[in-house]
Amino acid sequence: MRGTRANLVIRQDEAQHFKATLYLEPGEGENQQAFGSQAFSSTVDKALGSLSDQNPGLSGEPSEFGWKIKFPEAYDEGHEAHFTRVTQRYLQYLDDEALPAWERTNLLTKYFITTQAYALSREEKPS
């Protein structure tokens, strides 16, 4: 995800032992040194702290890319366990015959964009 001053990047290379790792990296034109400053460190700590109620143990540390965001081991469930959990939730939605609340917004957005694009494609183009 790209922001105005920073990007969230998932890397999964040999350097990360092929394990998905989240980084907060400087955005285009941002100074890499600023990401290592005490002021920025304080900003990252404050932001991660604001998430600690919902995500206890979340932390960050400076890295060669900017900041490495660290998650507690409790969140590391692996592919098979994650697939099982997602499947169980999906089947529960089918059982309940209801969409999850977050999906409603996604669907409305998708169909709005699609119908607007269709309408624009049918407009007469100036010669």
Image: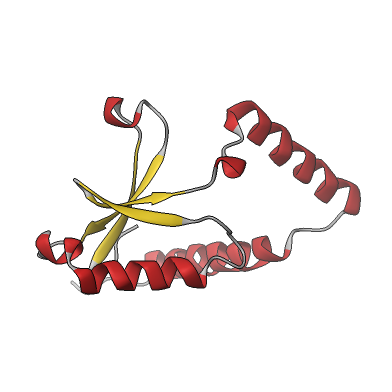
Residue 12's spot in the image, x, y percent?
35, 33
The quarter of the displayed image where residue 45 is located: bottom left
Residue 8's spot in the image, x, y percent?
33, 55
Front-most of 72 and 65? 72
Q: Is residue 100 left or right of residue 75?
A: right
Residue 17's spot in the image, x, y percent?
36, 26
Q: Residue at x 24, y 70 (%)?
A: 40
Q: Is residue 91 left or right of residue 46?
A: right
Q: Is residue 124 above or below residue 63?
A: below
Q: Is residue 32 visible?
A: yes
Front-most of 97 and 87? 87
Q: Residue at x 87, y 54 (%)?
A: 97
Q: Which image quarter holds the C terminus?
A: bottom left
- Which residue extends farthest right? 95
Q: Residue at x 54, y 69 (%)?
A: 112
Q: Residue at x 79, y 39 (%)?
A: 88
Q: Is residue 125 above or below residue 93?
A: below
Q: How many numbered marks appear? A: 0
The quarter of the displayed image where residue 5 is located: bottom left
Q: Is residue 4 visible?
A: no
Q: Is residue 13 above or below residue 90?
A: above
Residue 21's spot in the image, x, y percent?
39, 41
Q: Is residue 9 above or below residue 106?
A: above
Front-most of 30 and 1? 30
The quarter of the displayed image where residue 39 is located: bottom left
Colouring chosen for the image of the structure: secondary structure
Q: Which image quarter holds the N terminus?
A: bottom left
